[in-house]
Amino acid sequence: MPENSSSVAKMPAKEKLQQEEQERPQPPTSRQYRPLATRIRRRIEKGRRWFSCEFFPPRTPAAAVNLVSKFDSFARGRPLFCDVTWHPAGNPAGDSPTSSTSVASAMLNYCGIDTVLHLTCVGQTEARLVRVLDRAKSLGLKNILALRGDLPEDADGNPGGASAAASGGPAFASDLLLLHRRGRLPGGPPGGRQLREDLRRLKEKVDAGGEFIITQLFFDSADFIRFVSDCRRVGIDCPIIPGVLPVQGYQSLRHIVKLSKLTVPDSMLRVIEPIRDNDEAIRNYGIAQCTQMCQELLQSGQVHGIHFYTLNRDAATIRILKNIGLWREDLPRPLPWQPSANYERCAEAVRPVFWSRRPTSYVHRTRHWDDYPHGRWGSECAEIGELRDYYLFYLTVRASKQERLRMWGSEPTSEPDIWRVFASHLSGKPVSPDGVRVTRLPWGDEEPLPSSSESNEAAEARQRLAGLSERGLLATNHLLRVNGASSDHPVHGWGGSGGFVYQRAYLEFFPARPPAASAAGEPRHHGGGRVSFHIADRSGNVNLANFSEPIALTWGVFPASEVAQPTVCDGAAFLAWRDEAFALWTEEWGRLYEEGSPSRRLIESVAETYLLVALVDNDFTEDSVLWDLTDQVARGGRRLG
């Protein structure tokens, strides 16, 4: 193992400071779509570093759920883009959750990662390729990695048993690029055996419209440097990104080497062979070897970005990215919520708060909008599509039925059984004697943060919410007040550097003891009272509110920019969320149990008799009164209004 394998590539302090300043997001009001190839070139010109990753479509829906969770993990490290491979045998252009286009669409639209979709042309007709490209465009996929693809095997297992030309379709990736040049089409890695032929074909791809190149994997940084020199010599001047693979297992390495027709350096084999049966030792070596190679590439002056072949695993790649300083969770968020990477939504700068724990549903329900709000939210923005397909794959809770039954109860028989589930989710304490913890609820996509990752204020708030839930006020969403925090704040910060952010305290819950809103006082704008509220039931018989205009819950003030108000509480949007929130009781939770069973009847009764309440404390300069108010409601001694 290399002696310096644990060292971290460092840059001078001044250079690092300049890079951090360049990478800070711009104020939300200035967001606009820039093609991926343009962003790559700009980063190279400015000396800014990045990383990207490759994934392949999973075989089963359960594996797809797990893969989407990995996308969320990688999104926190700010990859410039990720790509999804094309698997001809798995109906890659289909609608199933395991198809290449569905996985790429989920990554782009739901996980907020700019996405590149692989597309191979071998064995395909021109008409079918045009349909695939048109569908990709309709999903927001602007970037295609053009590949020839592997030739089909003949009866003896040799490649070339059938040719693309026989189908009347393109024979090479350059033909695919010429077929469809409307999008931004990066070139793919060379596939021929002889270098001269490889370079000729590669140049044809670039001349046909390819805008950057991702190489096949390699195990020696000198091989990549030599390859770049050969490309420049024949006139290929587009960006060339090295593709690297952390070795994660002996058998997987053998398989990949066979497919790619690569040679493993003797220096690697001498280390790997003695530990071939020790998986942990292999993984540790792979991380060390890849870390050193990436350091050499970045220090060469010819590499600014590195592409990782992840094999759909996250741990090793993330460790390497942290080792080489490319994992950047410390940068401020561009907005308080994760923006979609779809180019049609790039100007979107305002969302209702209600879907902040369930953002995939909001993206799905607004996917057909012609225009997305980039200023203040208004009634014209509130036409949110109906959600009838509650079992749409990417909207369901990311846990199996067995896991949900363990967390939510195999046979709940009383309302306090349900209250304890909510309390466990908030407090992190086990919900049962066997140590089961509730990591997910129907109203949230993400697991709660570990207490070590939270501020003291946030941890205290979760414990108070857990206490309210134990008494029948089932909290589903909340925001803490923020009064002029720096936009660089590690917890509350968002937007560009040099700004200040603000936030009203917000609380949303299902009360078991229905609070009644006072009839005193006419509906008013949010400036007219300390607490604004909206209360509704499932049937529509109850719909009470004391505000009529959208309330800005979060806003930011940035240099030379308009005030940004990215999160709002809006009455019309609340009613759309109300329908979804109550349906989640029966569709996600109730359907776990047999029809007519006591447990299903219990959940259905809760959905029919509880209310949904949203509260806003309009005074963000003082400690919130929402805690005292909800505590009194839980005791039955206070009416909202």
Image: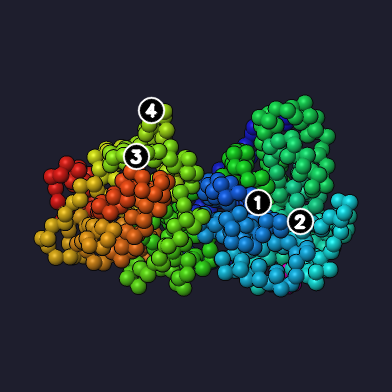
- The answer to whether residue 411 is above or below residue 124 is above
Which comes before the other along the chain, label 4 or label 2? 2
Residue corresponding to mark 3: 412
Pointer 4 or 1: first along the chain: 1
Q: Which residue is mark 4?
A: 433
Q: Residue at x 72, y 65 (%)?
A: 210
Q: Residue 602's x, y, as percent? A: 31, 46
In the rendered image, the residue lying farthest to the top is 274
Which residue occupies the foreground of this view, 507 or 38? Answer: 507
Q: Mark 3, mark 4: which one is toward the viewer?
A: 3
> What amino acid type is highlighted by mark number 4?
Pro
Instruction: Look at 65% across and 69% down and name the residue there.
Output: 133
Q: Helix, strand or loop at disc 1?
A: loop
- Residue 189 is marked as 2
Residue extent of the magenta highlight: 177-181
Gap in angstroms between the C-alphas marked 1 and 3: 40 Å
Nearer to us in this view, 31 or 451 = 451
Residue density around tag 4, few if under 14, some if 14–19, many if 20 or more, within 10 Å: few
Residue hosting label 1:
56
Q: Earlier in the sequence, mark 3 or mark 4?
A: 3
Number of the front mark, 1 or 3: 3
Which of the two marks, 4 or 2, is nearer to us in this view?
4
CB under 8 Å between discs 4 and 2: no
- Give the alpha-carbon distance from disc 3 to disc 2, as whole Å: 56 Å
Marks 2 and 1, how far apart at CA: 17 Å
In the rendered structure, which disc, 3 or 2, sits on the residue that comes first in sequence? 2
Residue extending furthest toward the left: 520
Verify whether residue 360 appears in magenta: no
Disc nearest the viewer among 3 and 2: 3
Q: Is residue 630 visible?
A: yes
